[in-house]
């Protein structure tokens, strides 16, 4: 999974949490919810060596491109 997080082009990347049962570290073993997606973004940023803000911005842009009927 880490290898894919690095190889997927940023203009094709979306992130999510595996709610409700597979919470990211540091919440492993507890119920998960979408508010914990920041931990996924932080991990991807660390793996790629970029600021988490870049991952957040790019994945947000990708979401709105994919779901273009949703107003930003």
Image (spheres, rainbow, N blue to C red):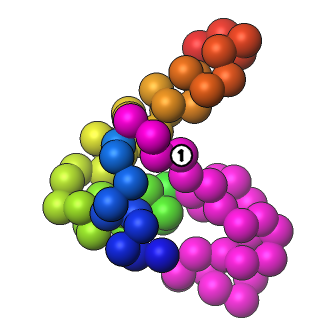
Of 55 and 35, the residue lying toward us: 55
The residue carrying pointer 1 sits among few (fewer than 14), some (14 to 19) or many (20 or more) residues within 10 Å by Cα, namely some
The structure residue drawn at horizontal position 45% and vertical position 40%, both measured from the top left corner, is 12
| Secondary structure mostly seen in the magenta stretch | loop
Of 47 and 7, the residue lying toward us: 7
Above or below 34: residue 32: below
Above or below 65: residue 58: below
Question: Looking at the figure, which quarter contains the C terminus?
Answer: top right
The structure residue drawn at horizontal position 58% and vertical position 22%, both measured from the top left corner, is 64
What span is colored magenta in the figure?
11-37
Image x and y of residue 21, in percent: 80, 77
Q: Is residue 16 magenta?
A: yes
Image x and y of residue 15, in percent: 55, 52
Q: Is residue 49 magenta?
A: no
The structure residue drawn at horizontal position 38% and vertical position 35%, both measured from the top left corner, is 11
Q: Is residue 18 left or right of residue 64?
A: right
Identify the element where label 1 is drawn.
loop
Q: Among all residues in the image, which is located at the extreme left? A: 49
Quarter of the image for residue 65 reads top right
Image x and y of residue 30, in percent: 74, 82
Quarter of the image for residue 68 reads top right
For disc 1, the marked residue is 14
Q: Is residue 31 left or right of residue 57?
A: right
The structure residue drawn at horizontal position 62% and vertical position 55%, both measured from the top left corner, is 16
- Residue 55 visible somewhere in the drawing: yes
Above or below 2: residue 44: above
Q: Among all residues in the image, which is located at the extreme bottom? A: 29
- Residue 31 visible somewhere in the drawing: no
- Tell me how many marks there are: 1
Image x and y of residue 62, in percent: 50, 31
């Amino acid at each position: 999974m880490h290898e894919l997080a690095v190889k997927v082009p940023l203009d094709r990347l979306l992130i999510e949490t595996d709610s409700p049962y597979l919470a990211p570290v540091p919440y492993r073993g507890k119920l998960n919810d979408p508010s914990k997606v920041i931990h996924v973004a932080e991990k991807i940023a660390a793996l790629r060596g970029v600021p988490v803000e870049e991952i957040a911005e790019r994945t947000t842009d990708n979401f709105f491109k994919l779901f273009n009927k949703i107003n930003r």
